[in-house]
Image (cartoon, rainbow, N blue to C red):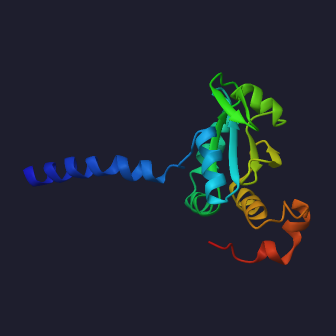
């Protein structure tokens, strides 16, 4: 019985790091943009508010999925931006609040996913909750350069490239 109790205690000590490792590794705005420039990767910015139920659902149903986490980790620098935040962040050489930056980026509702290129230039905004399978297709659309080449998302979604397996 004592052995079982010790095993349970040891196992419970190991579980929190495993659970934490499964969560998205979001970065702050400034650190994320600096990392994107250094790595040459686009930025996935999750623009949210604390009171937004759809933002929490996006976290739970989309960002928590292992396939999405793996794709984001391999192709993007993920950043969280509080659209009502008063903390100062830097963008395009200026210091501003998260709330002002969200407005400058054209965010009008929550959640909004903003994609930036590796130099911090805005590629596109995707307002609202996006179901996980469609979101994975959207990630591929940006990571594979279709957005930068001016291909519409609808054209990409109908193309053979969209039906091809995702590159890891």
**Relative to the observer, which residue lies in front, 89 or 159?**
89
Residue furthest front in the image? 93
On screen, residue 115 above or below 89: below
Q: Is residue 108 visible?
A: no
**Relative to the observer, which residue lies in front, 66 or 142?**
142
On screen, residue 159 above or below 24: below
Location of the C terminus by quadrant is bottom right
Q: Position of residue 120 (x, y in %)?
A: 74, 47
Residue furthest top in the image? 86
Residue for point 58% across, 57% down: 69
Classify residue 148 as left or right of residue 60.
Answer: right
Q: Is residue 75 visible?
A: yes
Residue for point 26% across, 47% down: 13
**Relative to the observer, which residue lies in front, 34 or 10?**
34
Classify residue 49 as left or right of residue 151.
Answer: left
* Total marks placed: 0
Residue for point 18% across, 53% down: 7
Residue furthest left in the image? 2
On screen, residue 39 above or below 121: below
**Relative to the observer, which residue lies in front, 85 or 62?**
85
Residue for point 76% across, 26% down: 100
Q: Position of residue 85 (x, y in %)?
A: 66, 25
Q: Position of residue 33 (x, y in %)?
A: 65, 46
On screen, residue 104 above or below 24: above
Q: Position of residue 72 (x, y in %)?
A: 62, 58
């Amino acid at each position: 019985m004592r052995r079982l109790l010790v095993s349970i205690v040891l196992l419970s000590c190991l579980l929190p790091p495993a659970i934490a490792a499964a969560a998205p590794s979001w970065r702050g705005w400034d650190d994320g943009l600096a990392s994107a420039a250094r790595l040459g990767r686009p930025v996935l910015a999750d623009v949210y508010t604390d009171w937004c139920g759809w933002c929490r659902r996006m976290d739970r149903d989309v960002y928590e999925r292992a396939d999405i986490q793996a794709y984001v980790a391999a192709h993007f620098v993920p950043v969280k931006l509080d659209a009502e935040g008063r903390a100062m962040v830097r963008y395009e050489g200026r210091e501003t609040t998260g709330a002002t930056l969200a407005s400058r980026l054209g965010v009008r509702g929550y959640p909004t996913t903003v994609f930036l290129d590796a130099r911090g230039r805005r590629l596109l905004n995707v307002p609202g909750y996006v179901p996980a399978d469609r979101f994975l297709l959207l990630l591929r659309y940006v990571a594979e350069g279709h957005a930068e080449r001016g291909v519409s998302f609808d054209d990409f979604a109908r193309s053979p490239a969209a039906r091809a397996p995702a590159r890891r």
